[in-house]
Amino acid sequence: MAVLAAVAAHLGRDVARALPKVEGILEDARAAGADLVVLPDAALGGYLSDLGEPDAADLPAPLAVDGPEVARIRRAAGRTVVCVGLAEAVPGDPRRRWNTAVCCSAERVWGVHRKVHRPLGESRVYAAGDRFAAFDTPVGRVGMLTSYDKTFPEAARALADDGAVLLACLGAWPASTTDRAAALPQDRQSRLFDLYDLARAAENQVVLVSSNQTGVQGRLRFLGQAKVVGPGGDVLARTGVKGGMAVAEVDVPHEVGRARRRLHHLAERVPAAYGRRP
């Protein structure tokens, strides 16, 4: 059995203030017995203030995967596996970042993912990653998606094809900026955020752990709604729109195996039927 924790939190742009908050979250997660904790995208350093017209002079502080901030997270993690988002420096290009997810524990950095899909104006200031690759961890084989990546079925499928049984989806997912709802749960982006979480888990028959930012950054209002989803698309635990931690105890190999016992989506595909015809 593994205890999986998905975090909804507002951590802000100030890395020095965010780090002790993250340490406190990890302390609470360890007290709950968590084996895996998925923190939001951009947990260290924050996200953009305007997704439509981002200001290249107002980017999050650039950090390094092997830098002191990640080292501090690793010390705080201990044996717990932690996925955390940050803005990574792009060598030779101080005006751009990678939107990077790091999976680590005190033992080592287990995996790194650089966000591939960049919505709206994000492509002006963030460089794109170029791959989806799963990796082994003490809690099983994991694949990471960052926010908009989970909109694309091919991304999660590539990770499942690579053997991932756990998908960690790190979110900095805001409400709609063009069609605001009076309440966040009624926002159309709120519905899509939930829909993609459930669909990506069910279509690949994997366990999905989805985090998200909360609060406000510039023009963006984040949705929260962190959750743990089973391989049948069933929500096992979730938060609301405010900060919190969704915690579920899951026997991942058993649940994934049971989901695939009769209907095995990966094995029953017909790739020859999906290609373009002349």
Image (cartoon, grey):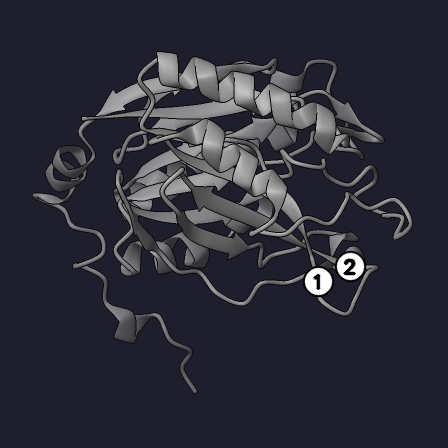
Q: Position of residue 180 (x, y in %)?
A: 77, 25
Judged from the image, the secondary structure of the residue bearing numbered disc 1 is loop
Q: Amino acid at mark 1?
A: Val
Q: Amino acid at mark 2?
A: Arg
Badge 2: residue crowd in 10 Å (few <14, some 14–19, many ≥20): many
Discs 1, 2 touching: Cβ within 8 Å: yes
Taking depth in this image into account, of 72 and 40 the one nearest to the observer is 72
**Residue 90 image label:** 1
Q: Position of residue 219 (x, y in %)?
A: 84, 31
Q: Residue at x 45, y 56 (%)?
A: 155
Left or right, 81 with reference to 211:
left
Q: Position of residue 3 (x, y in %)?
A: 29, 23
Taking depth in this image into account, of 1 and 82 the one nearest to the observer is 82
With respect to residue 22, does 104 lie above or below?
A: below
Q: Quadrant of residue 154?
A: bottom left
Badge 1: residue crowd in 10 Å (few <14, some 14–19, many ≥20): some
- Residue 196 in view, yes or no: no
Q: Position of residue 163 (x, y in %)?
A: 25, 55
**Mark 1 or 2, which is nearer the eye?**
1
**If the image is split into quadrants, where does the C terminus sit?**
bottom left
**If the image is split into quadrants, where does the N terminus sit?**
top left
**Separation of residues labelled 1 and 2 (CA atoms):** 6 Å
Judged from the image, the secondary structure of the residue bearing numbered disc 2 is loop
Q: Residue at x 43, y 35 (%)?
A: 82
Q: Quadrant of residue 241?
A: top right
Q: Which residue is mark 2?
A: 96
**Residue 6 image label:** none
Q: Residue at x 79, y 56 (%)?
A: 125
With respect to residue 175, does 32 lie above or below?
A: above
- Residue 67 in view, yes or no: yes
Left or right, 36 with reference to 9:
left
Comes first in the chain, label 1 or label 2: 1
